Amino acid sequence: MRAAVLHEVGAPLRIEELELDPPKAGEVSVRMLASGVCHSDVHRADGDWGEGSIHPIVLGHEGAGVVETLGDGVTGLELGQLVALNWYYPCGACERCAQGREWLCTGSRSTEHLQMDGTTRIHTSSALDVRAYLSIGTFGERAVVPAQAAVPMPEGTPPEVAALIGCCVSTGIGAVVNTANLLPGVPTVIVGLGGVGLSAVMGAVLRGADPIVAVDLDPAKLELAQDLGATHAVSGGDREAALQEIHRITAGGAAVAFETAGVTAAAELTISSVGRGGTAVLVGLPAVGARASFEVFGVVDGSMHIVGSLYGWTVGARDFPLYAHLFLDGRLPLDRLVQERIGLEDVNRAMDALRAGQGARRVIVFEARSERSP
């Protein structure tokens, strides 16, 4: 199979031919149809999150494809079935999984980029092991993944939409629906309008928040956010002017504000956007070690909450199909997130666009497509 491989932090990805082993017990092989290019791939490639010695590795973690082979003991999946891939596959056996908090699973080996048995299924022609980013490596034409990472999607779901549901959609909408449990009529602010932030805007519209204030530096993203249902657009270029406008629109500050950019300045702006008794939900992941500051007196005096939301507190088997059904019903225009459909050879250009803050999502569309078996 062809795949985009990171060999060295800071270096461009290389498109290479790799060998893929068949799935072992509890695993499935998937032929990839689509993969979003996410800022988390950029963070990994640029060394923002450490792990500098884990090379080579197939990047990509926002993907969808069709099931090609079932390993021994796998149930609940069918050959030819479209699946979205969960980048933090749950072990299903730890205490957090039993509590329904799969995003905190302690048994997953996803962040080691390995299968449950601690090995990888990808190799070079010279038998050098290659890891799959977050155990799914969606920048490859095929992948072997733990069965619990493959979530069946409803008939008619476009592969590009299914891929985005696997990360940015679930992270953004999940922060709104799961983490904040946003209620109708609640004044809401979303800071950062990449794929995650625009998904949060759609989630806020779905929940009936009002007003919905979208904040970003890019006029094109602000316009798209309003097209998707944001009631107000505020430029974040001047912090004090932005805060003044946010507090004016929300009559004293947001009840809930979401930071989705993964930038410390955005986190600080988000916290300052919240009114008395409100909640700041921090969704974006900056570089390891990055620190933000806020006025402690204001947080305490205003009885404010600051909450972290990893992966939108997603339970893949529950949330992925739900978002797909809402898309198919016309209630979530998730296809509007697709800025451009590209080939695998354009992956470095797409990552450079993310570094420059350009656009929502560029999606790799793999040439080979299969229909589900009858």
Image (cartoon, rainbow, N blue to C red):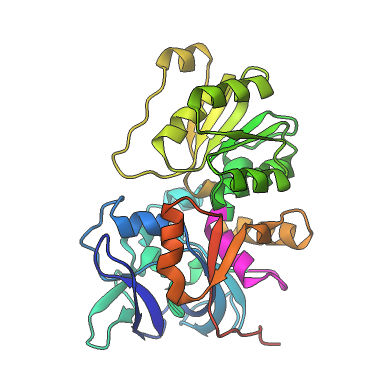
Residue 165 in the magenta stretch? The answer is yes
Q: Quadrant of the N terminus?
A: bottom left
At a point 26% along the width and 71% down the height, the residue shown is: 56
Residue 26: give x, y in percent of width and height: 44, 75
Rendered position, 18 above or below 157: below
Q: Quadrant of the C terminus?
A: bottom right
Image: magenta residue range: 153-168
At a point 38% along the width and 57% down the height, the residue shown is: 42
In this view, the residue in front, 51 or 190, is 190
From this viewpoint, which residue is outermost toward the right?
A: 329
Q: Is residue 343 left or right of residue 3?
A: right
Rendered position, 239 above or below 14: above
Residue 192: give x, y in percent of width and height: 53, 41
At a point 49% along the width and 52% down the height, the residue shown is: 102
Residue 140: give x, y in percent of width and height: 43, 76
Quarter location, residue 367: bottom right
In this view, the residue in front, 212 or 126, is 212
Rendered position, 19 above or below 95: below
Total numbered labels: 0
Quarter location, residue 235: top right
Quarter location, residue 315: bottom right
Residue 336: give x, y in percent of width and height: 67, 58
Residue 239 seen in render: yes
